[in-house]
């Protein structure tokens, strides 16, 4: 990480550009390599999860806030967008409304929950996640509850007279690129936030909240801001999901799904730039393979993966590789020096 | 914004003797349940001075600090800073007005580099806002911040370590970094909580020099510490508190001669008895270390130490911070693996034996830092010292005889004991397994002389009953006063050893240990 005043050296910069170009190329080529409907379906799911995890990582990797109810905010965004577009709103407006609605719920939850510290905060987010699922289930007049919301319009985009409707049931590539665009945006946002004054304030809170407070950081307000941003990003993912699946049920936003996001974040590497890409890619792939082999086992395997991550890879896949690289470089430096 | 010095004191004018009143504490009181930690305390800090708030452990110093800095709300009383009533303000708001503190237990951002630490702490210097967040700060702003960070690091002398991770710094450097973090927040008034804790004389006086440098750069400093000599030497004025009440106030000379202060501080200053019963040279060894080496990863902490403790002996292990004393104890009790040499307890080699097995042989280890169970009563804590089987009432009674204060407080929650009593409880718990060899790590750390002496006397009584003791101590004077023999460790090796009485007079020991 470059720190104030340090000259940015040329090689790491080139290295990063190379990575970004390669990654983008791979992401763009992916639906043509995995060109079955299932393969493309998985790619869309991965991209949506990348958005979710990039937002969640602001809390977990950024501020050390273990939020365990994150998929509920996705649910709020999904229903908001689905209902409004169904009522005649344009898709981009519905998406914007999803972000605002989820952020607003995030504010309502975050203001009291962030008064609590550590495990208490995690437990409250966990319970709030369950409560939101219950509300989505029981507000039958609005959400049609457990019967599920059907007839959600496909996403339609109009740009300078050009119009396109993403009929995702049969045609997934276009929608994949749409989600890919927002995933890239979410990663960019996460990266920028991490390197800003706001991100440094979060990392101070993660390191030692009292110390952060004592050097003038308004810790509570900063945490609430992060929570609202993360919820808003989840709302965006929810909207993308709603108009992809064109069917919503509260079952898609339970605490189990929140837990999956948590595992994806830790597995990829909390607080790393590429972690939110690696975690969802790995887990979505593994879980879809498992669903074919042994459906009942998939969450058992998630649990095992989480344990392995905690024991073997406490910094996730990306964190582990970075550490290994640093150690190799240090070792080489010693031999040469 | 004036880039340049880290401190935002009155620039240009001679800060010292500027005379304005910066902080005024009026009749401050704080109750915890029925217990009054700070009672009707009033004092003020004048701009440009170094004011010391001194008092024994448990006197209410840290509570006062927490009240002034907004980490606790007072039960009654007011705090005025720069003429404004700031009672009950949140800490970050006070920090923005220029009132910045450090903490008693070292607090730095452990995972960040030294430079990143200071950068994070420069939060208030850094412009924010959504546009800068998304697109980055301007070149000039970045340069100004970098200059500020560099100036802070230069002031405290950590510029060369700026790329090192904070958790990898030596203890003394971490404490300096802590001060750097406070400086990065550009304080008008800097409050330092026990900046000398765990430091030897050299380190203390270096820290005091740093405090003076900070003052000369224009900040005002309020320090709390229980170490009277260091404080009297370095502060312009002292306020002495005990039991939450102000005992004395004034220049160091007058305060240290105040009879009330002397009594609270030194107690009836009786010399410690030197151990009378010296074990015969032929006494059997209860502990032998034979060329013992221990490493942490690539760092060799202990390199081939030879040491023995005979039956009925008190042996002191002294040395500067980081010399390997605690490592040696942890190796003996089996908490750290030995990669070289051999350890024998009561005549049998213990390599491969677990800690629990070694305890069953008759050894007990009392680690540094008074590790007690705060939510359990004193008696329950003592019962935890019996690993298996019922508690022998006669052993319990014996511990109570050794530490009568523990009997008085047997039903009280251990967390509510004072530091000295907690230390006695930790030793008492180690004694519950009726050990023949007691390993003690820094039993007087952070205790005022009166209580340290009490702990020392208990050790002597214990020794007279035939218990052998291996004592690791920062307080060399005390350790050498009560030990029969001593070893001086330096960089993981035995630098000197011999009868304690001789080492006490040895100039080399003073140099190794006291840096004098």
Image: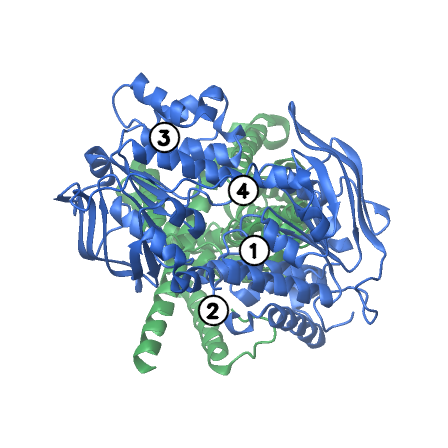
> Which residue bears the numbered disc 1?
A203
Judging by the rendered image, the residue that carries numbered circle 2 is: A24
**What is the spatial separation of the Cα atoms under label 3 and label 2, in whole angstroms?**
62 Å
- Marks 1 and 4: which is nearer the front? 4
Q: How far apart are labels 1 and 3 at the CA level?
A: 40 Å
Against A233, residue B411 (above or below) is above
Pointers 3 and 4 within a single chain: yes
From the viewer's perspective, is the residue at label 3 or at label 2 nearer?
Answer: 3
Residue A281 visible, this orientation: no
Is A205 rendered above or below residue A191?
A: above
Q: Earlier in the sequence, mark 1 or mark 2?
A: 2
Label 4, on which residue? Answer: B448
Task: Name the residue at the front extreme.
Answer: B276
Task: Choose mark 3 or mark 4, whichever is in front.
Answer: 4
Q: Tell me the crowding category of disc 2: few under 14, some 14 to 19, or many 20 or more residues within 10 angstroms, Cα based.
A: some
Residue extending furthest left?
A: B348
Q: Which chain is green?
A: A
Identify the subunit bearing mark 3: B
Specify the quadrant that holds the N terminus of chain B.
Answer: bottom right
Real-space CA distance between mark 1 and mark 4, rounded to the nearest whole angstrom:
37 Å
């Amino acid at each position: 990480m470059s720190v104030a005043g340090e000259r940015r050296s040329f090689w790491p910069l080139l290295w990063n550009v190379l990575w970004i170009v390669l990654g983008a190329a791979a992401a763009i080529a992916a639906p043509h390599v995995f060109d079955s409907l299932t393969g493309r379906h998985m790619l869309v799911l991965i991209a949506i999860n990348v958005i979710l995890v990039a937002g969640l990582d602001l809390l977990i990797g950024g501020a050390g806030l273990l939020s365990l109810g994150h998929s509920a905010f996705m649910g709020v965004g999904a229903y908001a967008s689905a209902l409004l577009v169904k009522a005649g709103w344009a898709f981009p407006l519905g998406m914007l409304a999803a972000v605002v609605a989820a952020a607003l719920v995030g504010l309502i939850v975050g203001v009291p929950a962030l008064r609590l510290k550590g495990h208490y905060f995690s437990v409250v987010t966990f319970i709030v996640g369950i409560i939101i699922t219950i509300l989505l289930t029981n507000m039958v007049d609005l959400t049609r509850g457990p019967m599920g919301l059907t007839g959600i319009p496909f996403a339609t985009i109009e740009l300078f007279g050009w119009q396109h409707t993403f009929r995702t049931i049969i045609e997934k590539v276009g929608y994949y690129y749409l989600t890919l665009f927002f995933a890239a945006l979410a990663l960019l946002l996460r990266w920028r936030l991490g390197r800003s004054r706001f991100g440094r304030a979060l990392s101070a809170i993660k390191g030692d909240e009292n110390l952060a407070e004592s050097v003038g950081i308004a810790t509570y307000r900063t945490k609430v801001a992060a929570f609202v941003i993360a919820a808003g990003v989840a709302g965006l993912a929810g909207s993308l999901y709603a108009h992809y699946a064109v069917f919503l049920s509260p079952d898609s936003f339970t605490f189990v799904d929140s837990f999956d996001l948590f595992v994806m974040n830790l597995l990829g590497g909390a607080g790393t730039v590429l972690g939110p890409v690696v975690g969802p890619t790995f887990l979505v792939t593994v879980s879809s393979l498992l669903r074919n082999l042994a459906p009942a086992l998939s969450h058992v395997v998630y649990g095992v993966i989480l344990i392995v991550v905690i024991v073997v890879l406490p910094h996730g896949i990306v964190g582990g590789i970075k550490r290994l690289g640093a150690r190799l470089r240090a070792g080489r430096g010693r031999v040469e020096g | 914004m004036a880039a340049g010095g880290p401190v935002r004191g009155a620039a240009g004018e001679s800060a010292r003797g500027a005379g304005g009143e910066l902080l005024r504490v009026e009749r401050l009181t704080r109750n915890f349940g029925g217990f009054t930690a700070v009672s009707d305390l009033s004092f003020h800090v004048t701009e440009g001075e170094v004011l010391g708030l001194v008092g024994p452990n448990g006197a209410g110093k840290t509570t006062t600090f927490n009240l002034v800095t907004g980490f606790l709300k007072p039960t009654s009383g007011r705090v005025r800073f720069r003429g404004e009533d700031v009672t009950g303000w949140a800490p970050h708001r006070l920090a923005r007005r220029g009132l910045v503190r450090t903490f008693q237990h070292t607090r730095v951002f452990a995972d960040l580099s030294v430079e990143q630490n200071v950068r994070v702490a420069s939060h208030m210097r850094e412009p924010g806002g959504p546009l800068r967040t998304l697109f980055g700060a301007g070149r000039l702003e970045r340069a100004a911040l970098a200059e500020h960070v560099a100036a802070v690091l230069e002031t405290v002398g950590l510029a060369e370590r700026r790329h090192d991770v904070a958790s990898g710094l030596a203890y003394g450097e971490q404490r300096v970094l802590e001060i750097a973090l406070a400086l990065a927040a550009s304080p008008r008034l800097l409050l330092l909580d026990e900046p000398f804790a765990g430091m030897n004389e050299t380190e203390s006086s270096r820290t005091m020099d740093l405090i003076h440098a900070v003052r000369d750069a224009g900040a005002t400093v309020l320090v709390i510490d229980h170490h009277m000599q260091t404080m009297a030497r370095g502060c312009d004025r002292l306020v002495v508190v005990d039991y939450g009440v102000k005992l004395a106030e004034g220049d160091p000379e007058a305060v240290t001669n105040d009879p009330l202060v002397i009594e609270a501080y030194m107690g009836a200053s009786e010399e410690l008895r030197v151990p009378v019963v010296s074990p015969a040279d032929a006494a059997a060894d209860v502990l032998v270390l034979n060329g013992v080496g221990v490493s942490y990863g690539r760092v060799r902490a202990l390199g081939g130490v030879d040491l023995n403790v005979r039956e009925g002996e008190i042996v002191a292990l002294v040395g500067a911070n980081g010399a390997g004393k605690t490592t040696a104890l942890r190796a003996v009790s089996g908490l750290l693996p030995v990669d070289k040499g051999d350890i024998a307890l009561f005549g049998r080699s213990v390599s491969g034996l677990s800690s629990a097995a070694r305890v069953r042989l008759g050894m007990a280890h009392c680690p540094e830092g008074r590790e007690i169970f705060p939510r359990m009563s004193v008696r329950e804590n003592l019962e935890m010292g019996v690993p298996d089987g019922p508690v022998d009432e006669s052993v319990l009674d014996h511990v109570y005889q050794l530490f009568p204060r523990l009997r008085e407080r047997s039903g009280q929650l251990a967390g509510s004991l004072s530091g000295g009593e907690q230390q006695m409880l930790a030793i008492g718990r180690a004694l519950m397994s009726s050990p023949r060899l007691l390993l003690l790590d820094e039993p007087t750390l952070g205790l005022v002389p009166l209580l340290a002496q009490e702990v020392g006397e208990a050790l002597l009584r214990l020794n007279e009953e035939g218990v052998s003791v291996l004592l690791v101590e920062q307080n060399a004077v005390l350790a050498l006063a009560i030990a029969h023999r001593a070893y001086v460790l330096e960089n993981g090796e035995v630098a000197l050893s011999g009868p304690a009485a001789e080492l006490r007079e040895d100039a080399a020991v003073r140099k190794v240990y006291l840096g004098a």
